[in-house]
Amino acid sequence: MAAEHVEHERAEHDDHPAYPVGLRLSGRRVVVIGGGQVAQRRLPALIAAGADITLVSPSATPSVEAMADAGEITWNKRPYEDGDLAGSWYALVASSDADANNAASAEAERTRTWCVRSDDADAATAWTPATGRSEGVTVAVLTTDVQGRDPRHTAAIRDAVVEGLRDGTLVARHHRTRTPGVALVGGGPGDPDLITVRGRRLLAEADVVIADRLGPRDLLDELPPHVEVIDAAKIPYGRYMAQEAINSALIEHAKAGKAVVRLKGGDPFVFGRGMEEAQALAEAGIPCTVVPGISSSISVPGAAGIPVTHRGVAHEFTVVSGHVAPDDERSLVDWPALARLRGTLVVLMGVDKIGAIAQTLIAHGKAAETPVALVQEGTTAAQRRVDATLATVAETARAADVRPPAVIVIGDVVAVGTK
Protein backbone atom coordinates (compact mmCIF):
# COMPACT_ATOMS: atom_id res chain seq x y z
CA MET A 1 0.00 0.00 0.00
CA ALA A 2 2.88 2.38 0.80
CA ALA A 3 4.34 2.01 -2.70
CA GLU A 4 0.90 2.53 -4.24
CA HIS A 5 0.49 5.65 -2.12
CA VAL A 6 3.81 7.06 -3.30
CA GLU A 7 2.95 6.38 -6.96
CA HIS A 8 -0.45 7.99 -6.43
CA GLU A 9 1.19 11.09 -4.90
CA ARG A 10 3.66 11.29 -7.78
CA ALA A 11 0.84 11.03 -10.32
CA GLU A 12 -1.01 13.83 -8.54
CA HIS A 13 2.10 16.01 -8.57
CA ASP A 14 2.65 15.36 -12.27
CA ASP A 15 -0.81 16.73 -13.08
CA HIS A 16 0.44 20.25 -12.34
CA PRO A 17 3.20 22.39 -13.86
CA ALA A 18 6.30 23.24 -11.86
CA TYR A 19 6.27 26.46 -9.86
CA PRO A 20 9.22 28.64 -10.99
CA VAL A 21 11.34 30.21 -8.27
CA GLY A 22 14.85 31.65 -7.90
CA LEU A 23 16.84 30.07 -5.08
CA ARG A 24 19.15 32.34 -3.07
CA LEU A 25 21.85 29.89 -2.02
CA SER A 26 24.63 32.23 -0.92
CA GLY A 27 26.24 30.78 2.22
CA ARG A 28 23.71 27.96 2.36
CA ARG A 29 24.60 24.28 2.33
CA VAL A 30 24.18 22.44 -0.97
CA VAL A 31 25.02 18.76 -1.41
CA VAL A 32 25.94 17.19 -4.75
CA ILE A 33 25.90 13.40 -5.03
CA GLY A 34 28.17 12.22 -7.85
CA GLY A 35 31.19 13.87 -9.44
CA GLY A 36 30.60 13.12 -13.13
CA GLN A 37 29.46 15.12 -16.16
CA VAL A 38 26.28 16.43 -14.56
CA ALA A 39 28.18 17.77 -11.57
CA GLN A 40 30.80 19.29 -13.87
CA ARG A 41 28.09 21.18 -15.73
CA ARG A 42 26.02 22.29 -12.73
CA LEU A 43 28.70 23.10 -10.15
CA PRO A 44 29.94 26.36 -11.74
CA ALA A 45 26.50 27.94 -11.44
CA LEU A 46 26.18 26.79 -7.82
CA ILE A 47 29.63 28.19 -7.08
CA ALA A 48 28.69 31.47 -8.75
CA ALA A 49 25.56 31.57 -6.54
CA GLY A 50 27.81 31.53 -3.47
CA ALA A 51 26.57 28.18 -2.17
CA ASP A 52 28.48 26.23 0.49
CA ILE A 53 28.91 23.08 -1.58
CA THR A 54 29.75 19.57 -0.43
CA LEU A 55 30.41 16.94 -3.08
CA VAL A 56 29.92 13.29 -2.08
CA SER A 57 31.47 10.93 -4.60
CA PRO A 58 34.24 8.31 -4.69
CA SER A 59 35.59 9.86 -7.91
CA ALA A 60 35.29 13.01 -9.99
CA THR A 61 36.12 14.35 -13.43
CA PRO A 62 39.37 16.33 -13.65
CA SER A 63 37.47 19.62 -13.82
CA VAL A 64 35.45 18.81 -10.70
CA GLU A 65 38.65 17.71 -8.97
CA ALA A 66 40.18 21.07 -9.88
CA MET A 67 37.24 22.86 -8.23
CA ALA A 68 37.92 20.90 -5.03
CA ASP A 69 41.66 21.59 -5.21
CA ALA A 70 40.92 25.30 -5.60
CA GLY A 71 38.73 25.24 -2.48
CA GLU A 72 35.55 26.09 -4.38
CA ILE A 73 33.84 22.95 -3.07
CA THR A 74 34.39 20.43 -0.27
CA TRP A 75 34.86 16.89 -1.58
CA ASN A 76 34.05 13.84 0.54
CA LYS A 77 35.71 11.04 -1.46
CA ARG A 78 33.28 8.24 -0.68
CA PRO A 79 29.86 6.90 -1.69
CA TYR A 80 26.66 8.47 -0.42
CA GLU A 81 25.65 7.65 3.17
CA ASP A 82 22.35 8.27 4.90
CA GLY A 83 22.54 11.61 6.67
CA ASP A 84 24.72 13.33 4.06
CA LEU A 85 21.93 15.81 3.30
CA ALA A 86 21.62 16.96 6.92
CA GLY A 87 21.29 20.72 7.09
CA SER A 88 21.18 21.17 3.33
CA TRP A 89 18.86 23.52 1.48
CA TYR A 90 19.27 21.99 -1.95
CA ALA A 91 20.54 18.69 -3.30
CA LEU A 92 21.69 17.59 -6.74
CA VAL A 93 21.58 13.80 -7.07
CA ALA A 94 23.64 12.78 -10.08
CA SER A 95 25.68 9.66 -9.37
CA SER A 96 25.92 6.52 -11.51
CA ASP A 97 24.67 4.40 -8.60
CA ALA A 98 20.90 4.03 -8.90
CA ASP A 99 20.50 2.71 -5.34
CA ALA A 100 22.45 5.64 -3.92
CA ASN A 101 20.37 8.07 -5.98
CA ASN A 102 17.15 6.55 -4.69
CA ALA A 103 18.40 6.63 -1.09
CA ALA A 104 19.54 10.24 -1.35
CA SER A 105 16.24 11.21 -2.96
CA ALA A 106 14.36 9.50 -0.13
CA GLU A 107 16.43 11.37 2.46
CA ALA A 108 15.68 14.64 0.69
CA GLU A 109 11.98 13.82 0.81
CA ARG A 110 12.16 13.11 4.55
CA THR A 111 14.12 16.27 5.33
CA ARG A 112 12.09 18.47 2.96
CA THR A 113 15.19 19.37 0.95
CA TRP A 114 14.60 20.47 -2.64
CA CYS A 115 16.17 17.74 -4.76
CA VAL A 116 17.09 17.53 -8.45
CA ARG A 117 17.49 14.06 -9.97
CA SER A 118 19.58 13.75 -13.13
CA ASP A 119 18.49 10.16 -13.70
CA ASP A 120 14.78 10.39 -12.89
CA ALA A 121 13.11 13.78 -13.24
CA ASP A 122 9.76 12.35 -12.14
CA ALA A 123 11.25 11.35 -8.79
CA ALA A 124 12.67 14.83 -8.19
CA THR A 125 11.09 17.65 -6.20
CA ALA A 126 12.81 20.28 -8.33
CA TRP A 127 13.89 20.63 -11.96
CA THR A 128 16.85 22.55 -13.34
CA PRO A 129 15.59 24.98 -15.99
CA ALA A 130 17.37 25.79 -19.22
CA THR A 131 19.22 28.94 -18.20
CA GLY A 132 21.06 31.73 -19.97
CA ARG A 133 22.40 35.12 -18.96
CA SER A 134 22.66 38.50 -20.61
CA GLU A 135 23.47 41.93 -19.17
CA GLY A 136 22.58 41.05 -15.60
CA VAL A 137 19.42 39.13 -16.56
CA THR A 138 19.02 35.40 -15.98
CA VAL A 139 16.57 33.65 -18.28
CA ALA A 140 15.21 30.35 -16.96
CA VAL A 141 12.80 28.27 -19.03
CA LEU A 142 10.65 25.37 -17.79
CA THR A 143 8.08 23.59 -19.90
CA THR A 144 4.47 23.66 -18.68
CA ASP A 145 3.67 20.38 -20.44
CA VAL A 146 4.51 17.93 -17.65
CA GLN A 147 3.63 14.96 -19.85
CA GLY A 148 5.95 15.95 -22.66
CA ARG A 149 9.02 17.65 -21.19
CA ASP A 150 11.46 18.28 -24.02
CA PRO A 151 14.80 19.78 -22.91
CA ARG A 152 15.69 20.68 -26.49
CA HIS A 153 12.52 22.74 -26.79
CA THR A 154 13.17 24.65 -23.55
CA ALA A 155 16.84 25.18 -24.49
CA ALA A 156 15.81 26.57 -27.90
CA ILE A 157 13.40 29.03 -26.27
CA ARG A 158 16.07 30.04 -23.76
CA ASP A 159 18.58 30.65 -26.55
CA ALA A 160 16.14 32.73 -28.56
CA VAL A 161 15.30 34.96 -25.60
CA VAL A 162 18.93 35.40 -24.56
CA GLU A 163 20.06 36.25 -28.09
CA GLY A 164 17.17 38.68 -28.42
CA LEU A 165 18.26 40.37 -25.21
CA ARG A 166 21.82 40.59 -26.48
CA ASP A 167 21.00 42.13 -29.84
CA GLY A 168 17.97 44.09 -28.64
CA THR A 169 15.46 42.47 -30.95
CA LEU A 170 13.94 39.63 -28.92
CA VAL A 171 13.16 37.89 -32.21
CA ALA A 172 13.21 34.13 -31.72
CA ARG A 173 14.88 31.86 -34.24
CA HIS A 174 12.73 28.82 -35.06
CA HIS A 175 15.59 26.54 -36.07
CA ARG A 176 19.36 26.58 -35.98
CA THR A 177 21.44 25.40 -38.86
CA ARG A 178 24.06 22.85 -37.89
CA THR A 179 27.65 23.36 -38.96
CA PRO A 180 29.07 20.01 -40.15
CA GLY A 181 32.38 18.71 -38.85
CA VAL A 182 34.34 20.23 -35.99
CA ALA A 183 34.55 23.81 -34.77
CA LEU A 184 37.69 24.80 -32.86
CA VAL A 185 36.25 27.54 -30.68
CA GLY A 186 38.34 29.93 -28.64
CA GLY A 187 36.32 30.53 -25.49
CA GLY A 188 38.27 33.55 -24.30
CA PRO A 189 40.07 34.14 -21.00
CA GLY A 190 37.43 32.84 -18.59
CA ASP A 191 34.49 35.24 -18.36
CA PRO A 192 31.71 33.50 -20.34
CA ASP A 193 30.58 36.85 -21.77
CA LEU A 194 33.91 37.17 -23.58
CA ILE A 195 33.33 34.31 -26.01
CA THR A 196 32.59 35.53 -29.53
CA VAL A 197 29.03 35.61 -30.86
CA ARG A 198 29.97 33.00 -33.46
CA GLY A 199 31.54 30.78 -30.84
CA ARG A 200 28.45 30.92 -28.66
CA ARG A 201 26.19 30.11 -31.61
CA LEU A 202 28.27 27.10 -32.62
CA LEU A 203 28.25 25.93 -29.02
CA ALA A 204 24.46 26.14 -29.01
CA GLU A 205 24.31 23.95 -32.14
CA ALA A 206 26.65 21.27 -30.81
CA ASP A 207 25.85 17.63 -30.19
CA VAL A 208 29.25 17.03 -28.57
CA VAL A 209 31.50 19.49 -26.71
CA ILE A 210 35.08 18.58 -25.84
CA ALA A 211 36.07 21.16 -23.24
CA ASP A 212 39.29 22.26 -21.56
CA ARG A 213 39.51 23.14 -17.88
CA LEU A 214 40.62 26.65 -18.82
CA GLY A 215 37.66 27.21 -21.14
CA PRO A 216 34.69 29.30 -19.94
CA ARG A 217 33.14 26.53 -17.83
CA ASP A 218 29.97 28.50 -16.99
CA LEU A 219 28.89 28.06 -20.63
CA LEU A 220 28.59 24.30 -20.09
CA ASP A 221 25.65 24.95 -17.76
CA GLU A 222 23.73 26.46 -20.69
CA LEU A 223 23.96 23.29 -22.78
CA PRO A 224 20.80 21.16 -23.05
CA PRO A 225 20.99 17.71 -21.42
CA HIS A 226 21.32 15.82 -24.70
CA VAL A 227 24.70 17.42 -25.43
CA GLU A 228 27.60 15.12 -24.58
CA VAL A 229 30.36 16.92 -22.72
CA ILE A 230 33.80 15.29 -22.85
CA ASP A 231 36.27 16.50 -20.27
CA ALA A 232 39.68 17.15 -21.82
CA ALA A 233 40.94 18.95 -18.73
CA LYS A 234 44.69 19.20 -18.33
CA ILE A 235 45.30 19.88 -14.67
CA PRO A 236 48.96 20.91 -14.14
CA TYR A 237 50.91 17.86 -12.97
CA GLY A 238 47.70 15.87 -12.69
CA ARG A 239 45.46 13.78 -14.88
CA TYR A 240 45.13 14.69 -18.51
CA MET A 241 43.62 13.42 -21.71
CA ALA A 242 46.48 12.86 -24.18
CA GLN A 243 46.38 15.03 -27.31
CA GLU A 244 46.10 11.92 -29.44
CA ALA A 245 43.00 10.86 -27.53
CA ILE A 246 41.47 14.31 -28.03
CA ASN A 247 42.16 14.14 -31.77
CA SER A 248 40.60 10.67 -31.95
CA ALA A 249 37.50 11.81 -30.07
CA LEU A 250 37.04 14.77 -32.43
CA ILE A 251 37.32 12.53 -35.48
CA GLU A 252 35.13 9.74 -34.07
CA HIS A 253 32.20 11.99 -33.19
CA ALA A 254 32.44 14.01 -36.41
CA LYS A 255 32.41 10.83 -38.50
CA ALA A 256 29.28 9.79 -36.62
CA GLY A 257 27.55 12.82 -38.14
CA LYS A 258 27.54 14.93 -34.99
CA ALA A 259 28.22 18.64 -34.72
CA VAL A 260 31.35 18.84 -32.57
CA VAL A 261 32.78 21.84 -30.74
CA ARG A 262 36.27 21.81 -29.30
CA LEU A 263 35.95 24.50 -26.61
CA LYS A 264 39.34 25.88 -25.66
CA GLY A 265 40.48 28.64 -23.35
CA GLY A 266 41.76 31.84 -24.95
CA ASP A 267 42.52 31.43 -28.65
CA PRO A 268 42.91 27.97 -30.24
CA PHE A 269 46.25 28.88 -31.82
CA VAL A 270 47.92 30.62 -28.86
CA PHE A 271 49.58 27.79 -26.97
CA GLY A 272 46.36 25.84 -27.46
CA ARG A 273 47.49 23.05 -29.81
CA GLY A 274 44.73 24.11 -32.16
CA MET A 275 46.83 23.55 -35.26
CA GLU A 276 47.63 19.99 -34.17
CA GLU A 277 43.90 19.31 -33.98
CA ALA A 278 43.22 21.06 -37.29
CA GLN A 279 45.93 18.99 -38.98
CA ALA A 280 44.55 15.74 -37.56
CA LEU A 281 41.07 16.66 -38.79
CA ALA A 282 42.39 17.56 -42.25
CA GLU A 283 44.18 14.22 -42.53
CA ALA A 284 40.93 12.47 -41.62
CA GLY A 285 38.94 14.50 -44.16
CA ILE A 286 36.85 16.24 -41.49
CA PRO A 287 35.71 19.84 -42.17
CA CYS A 288 37.14 22.19 -39.58
CA THR A 289 35.95 25.67 -38.64
CA VAL A 290 38.32 27.83 -36.59
CA VAL A 291 36.72 30.47 -34.39
CA PRO A 292 39.36 32.80 -32.92
CA GLY A 293 39.09 33.67 -29.27
CA ILE A 294 40.25 36.53 -27.08
CA SER A 295 43.71 35.57 -25.86
CA SER A 296 44.47 35.82 -22.15
CA SER A 297 47.83 37.32 -23.10
CA ILE A 298 46.19 40.70 -23.77
CA SER A 299 42.74 40.44 -22.17
CA VAL A 300 43.85 39.44 -18.67
CA PRO A 301 46.38 42.26 -18.31
CA GLY A 302 43.73 44.63 -19.63
CA ALA A 303 41.17 43.38 -17.11
CA ALA A 304 43.74 44.04 -14.36
CA GLY A 305 44.32 47.60 -15.59
CA ILE A 306 47.60 46.88 -17.40
CA PRO A 307 48.01 47.93 -21.06
CA VAL A 308 50.50 45.67 -22.83
CA THR A 309 51.48 48.72 -24.91
CA HIS A 310 51.36 52.38 -23.91
CA ARG A 311 52.50 55.52 -25.70
CA GLY A 312 55.93 56.57 -24.53
CA VAL A 313 56.38 53.40 -22.47
CA ALA A 314 56.21 50.29 -24.68
CA HIS A 315 56.02 50.01 -28.47
CA GLU A 316 55.96 46.22 -28.55
CA PHE A 317 54.90 43.24 -26.52
CA THR A 318 56.12 39.66 -26.67
CA VAL A 319 54.15 36.61 -25.57
CA VAL A 320 56.10 33.53 -24.50
CA SER A 321 55.36 30.19 -22.88
CA GLY A 322 56.95 29.59 -19.51
CA HIS A 323 55.96 25.95 -19.13
CA VAL A 324 59.62 24.88 -19.31
CA ALA A 325 62.50 26.60 -17.50
CA PRO A 326 64.98 28.77 -19.43
CA ASP A 327 67.78 26.21 -18.90
CA ASP A 328 65.63 23.30 -20.09
CA GLU A 329 66.89 21.88 -23.38
CA ARG A 330 63.29 21.70 -24.62
CA SER A 331 62.86 25.48 -24.39
CA LEU A 332 62.54 27.25 -27.75
CA VAL A 333 62.62 30.75 -26.21
CA ASP A 334 65.65 33.03 -26.70
CA TRP A 335 65.66 34.43 -23.16
CA PRO A 336 68.89 36.46 -23.56
CA ALA A 337 67.29 38.25 -26.54
CA LEU A 338 64.12 38.92 -24.54
CA ALA A 339 66.18 40.47 -21.76
CA ARG A 340 67.47 43.07 -24.23
CA LEU A 341 64.00 44.11 -25.43
CA ARG A 342 62.54 47.37 -24.07
CA GLY A 343 58.89 46.42 -24.49
CA THR A 344 56.44 44.30 -22.51
CA LEU A 345 56.97 40.61 -21.85
CA VAL A 346 53.86 38.48 -21.23
CA VAL A 347 54.50 34.99 -19.86
CA LEU A 348 51.79 32.31 -19.97
CA MET A 349 51.97 29.02 -18.04
CA GLY A 350 54.97 30.25 -16.08
CA VAL A 351 53.89 30.49 -12.43
CA ASP A 352 56.12 27.71 -11.11
CA LYS A 353 59.06 28.79 -13.31
CA ILE A 354 58.91 32.53 -12.61
CA GLY A 355 61.90 32.44 -10.26
CA ALA A 356 64.16 30.88 -12.89
CA ILE A 357 62.74 33.17 -15.58
CA ALA A 358 63.41 36.29 -13.48
CA GLN A 359 66.96 35.20 -12.66
CA THR A 360 67.70 34.54 -16.34
CA LEU A 361 66.36 37.90 -17.46
CA ILE A 362 68.38 39.74 -14.79
CA ALA A 363 71.50 37.76 -15.65
CA HIS A 364 71.23 38.91 -19.27
CA GLY A 365 70.75 42.59 -18.51
CA LYS A 366 67.14 43.18 -17.49
CA ALA A 367 66.94 45.59 -14.56
CA ALA A 368 66.16 43.86 -11.27
CA GLU A 369 63.67 46.62 -10.38
CA THR A 370 61.60 45.99 -13.53
CA PRO A 371 57.91 45.85 -12.46
CA VAL A 372 56.10 42.51 -12.60
CA ALA A 373 52.41 41.68 -12.16
CA LEU A 374 50.88 38.24 -11.74
CA VAL A 375 47.16 38.15 -12.57
CA GLN A 376 45.45 34.97 -11.39
CA GLU A 377 42.06 33.79 -12.73
CA GLY A 378 41.85 36.87 -14.91
CA THR A 379 38.41 38.18 -16.03
CA THR A 380 36.60 35.88 -13.57
CA ALA A 381 35.05 36.68 -10.20
CA ALA A 382 38.16 35.16 -8.56
CA GLN A 383 40.60 37.51 -10.33
CA ARG A 384 43.42 38.90 -8.25
CA ARG A 385 46.60 40.82 -9.03
CA VAL A 386 49.92 40.49 -7.22
CA ASP A 387 52.68 43.03 -7.94
CA ALA A 388 56.42 42.62 -7.53
CA THR A 389 59.71 43.26 -9.31
CA LEU A 390 62.01 40.85 -11.11
CA ALA A 391 64.15 40.74 -7.99
CA THR A 392 61.25 39.90 -5.67
CA VAL A 393 58.75 38.06 -7.83
CA ALA A 394 59.76 34.51 -6.88
CA GLU A 395 59.33 35.08 -3.16
CA THR A 396 56.24 37.27 -3.65
CA ALA A 397 54.52 34.60 -5.74
CA ARG A 398 55.26 31.97 -3.09
CA ALA A 399 54.11 34.16 -0.22
CA ALA A 400 50.89 35.11 -2.03
CA ASP A 401 50.30 31.49 -3.08
CA VAL A 402 49.77 32.45 -6.71
CA ARG A 403 48.47 29.46 -8.66
CA PRO A 404 47.71 28.68 -12.29
CA PRO A 405 46.07 29.91 -14.36
CA ALA A 406 47.90 33.20 -14.08
CA VAL A 407 49.27 35.65 -16.64
CA ILE A 408 52.60 37.27 -15.81
CA VAL A 409 53.36 40.76 -17.16
CA ILE A 410 56.93 42.07 -17.05
CA GLY A 411 57.76 45.66 -17.98
CA ASP A 412 57.18 49.33 -17.23
CA VAL A 413 53.54 49.10 -18.38
CA VAL A 414 52.78 47.34 -15.09
CA ALA A 415 53.25 50.65 -13.27
CA VAL A 416 51.28 52.80 -15.74
CA GLY A 417 47.94 52.44 -13.99
CA THR A 418 49.43 52.87 -10.53
CA LYS A 419 51.17 56.20 -11.11
Image (cartoon, grey):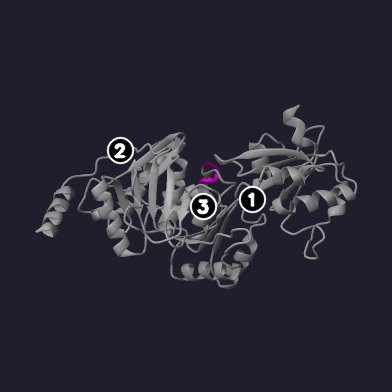
List the residue tagged with mark 3: 68
Discs 3, 2 touching: Cβ within 8 Å: no
Tag 1: Cα neighbours inside 10 Å, few (<14), some, or many (≥20)? some
Residue drawn at x 47%, y 71% is: 255
Tag 3: Cα neighbours inside 10 Å, few (<14), some, or many (≥20)? some
Give residue 404's mark: 1
Can you say whether 147 is above or below 89 in the image?
A: below
Q: How far apart are marks 3 and 1 (CA)?
A: 14 Å
117 horizontally vs 326: left or right? left
Of badges 3 and 1, nearer the viewer stands: 3
Q: How far apart are marks 1 and 2 (CA)?
A: 37 Å
- Residue 284 in which image quadrant: bottom right
Q: Which residue lies most toward the bottom here?
A: 284
Percent x, y for residue 8?
12, 54
SS label for mark 1: loop
Task: Look at the magenta stretch and give its main secondary structure.
Answer: helix
Q: How far apart are marks 3 and 2 (CA)?
A: 28 Å
Can you say whether 58 is above or below 32 in the image?
A: below
Percent x, y for residue 41?
44, 53
Q: What stretch is highlighted in magenta?
A: 193-197
359 horizontally vs 265: left or right? right
List the residue tagged with mark 2: 21
Percent x, y for residue 193?
52, 42
Q: Which amino acid does label 3 sit on?
A: Ala
